Every structure is written in C-alpha cells, then in structure tokens.
C-alpha cells in the first residue's frame, strides 16, 4: 500500500482496490493479508465497501514468520562463524 511513500501511495491504493474489486466479482472471495508486521493499518478504509476477508492481524502473529526469523538467525550465525552463545 506504500504507507511509507506518499508519492506512490495513491496509485498503490487504487491498484489494490481495483484488484480486490475485480477478483471478488470473478472469484467471489478475496483474502487480504496486509504486508505489514502488525495490524490492518489503513486497509479497512481503502477497501471500504468491497467484499473481502481479512483477520486484520498482519504478519507477526503467524508462526511461519517466527520460524522464518529463527531460520535466518541460524543461517547468519553459521555463515558468519558465530556460535549461538553470541546471542546471549
């Protein structure tokens, strides 16, 4: 949604809204997962009046994100030659 880039945000919002509108008509169901760490942010306002489903939680409550972070830390430690003790 380009929350961080004012110059591109209006166009991004239009694109997302058009996508949800088109696919909710074609497919009957659109699942919206915001690419943000926590919460639903401005999505509810931008998508107001459209048919979609969302839990409004963002990415962090997902156990898959936690597992991905853990894997990245382990990979970095291994590649850097550090031990897990470096995190303590």
Image: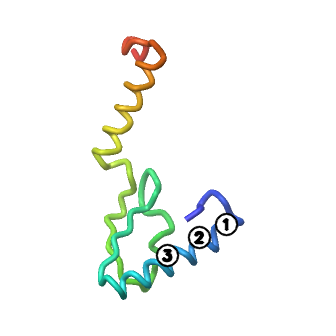
Q: Residues within 10 Å of mark 1 (few under 14, many from 20)?
A: few
Label 3 vs label 2: CA separation?
14 Å
Residue 64 occupies quadrant: top left
Q: Which residue is mark 1?
A: 8
Mark 2 burial class by Cα count in 10 Å: few <14, some 14-19, many 20+: some
Q: Which of the 4 quarters of the picture holds residue 52?
A: bottom left
Residue 22 lies, in percent from the top left, at 43, 84
Verify CB contact (< 8 Å) between mark 2 and mark 1: yes
Question: What residue sits right under mark 2 in the picture?
Answer: 12
- Mark 3 or mark 1, which is nearer to you? 1
User: Which type of secondary structure does the marked residue at label 2 adopt?
Assistant: helix
Q: Are marks 3 and 2 in contact (CB under 8 Å)?
A: no
Residue at position x 39%, y 63% in the image: 33
The quarter of the rendered structure image containing the C terminus is top left
Name the residue tied to disc 3. 45
Examine the rendered structure and indicate whether residue 41 appears above or below residue 49: above
In the rendered image, residue 78, in percent from the top left (x then y), is placed at 41, 18
In the drawing, does residue 44 fall left or right of residue 29?
A: right
Look at the numbered disc 3 and give the secondary structure of its residue: helix
In the depicted structure, whether residue 58 falls above or below residue 20: above
Image quarter for residue 50? bottom left
- N-terminal label among 3 and 2: 2
* In the image, residue 32 above or below residue 37: below
Residue drawn at (28%, 44%) of the image: 63
- SS for dot 1: helix
Is 22 situated left or right of 30 in this image?
right
Question: Local crowd at mark 3 within 10 Å, few (<14), some, or many (≥20)?
Answer: few
How far apart are labels 2 and 1 at the CA level? 6 Å
* Structural distance between the alpha carbons of marks 3 and 1: 17 Å
């Amino acid at each position: 949604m380009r929350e961080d880039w004012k110059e591109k945000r209006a166009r991004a919002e239009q694109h997302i809204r058009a996508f949800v509108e088109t696919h909710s008509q074609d497919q009957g169901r659109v699942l919206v997962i915001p690419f943000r760490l926590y919460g639903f942010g401005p999505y509810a306002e931008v998508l107001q009046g459209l048919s979609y489903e969302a839990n409004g939680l963002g990415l962090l409550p997902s156990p898959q994100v936690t597992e991905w972070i853990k894997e990245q830390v382990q990979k970095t430690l291994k590649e850097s030659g550090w031990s897990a003790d470096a995190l303590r």
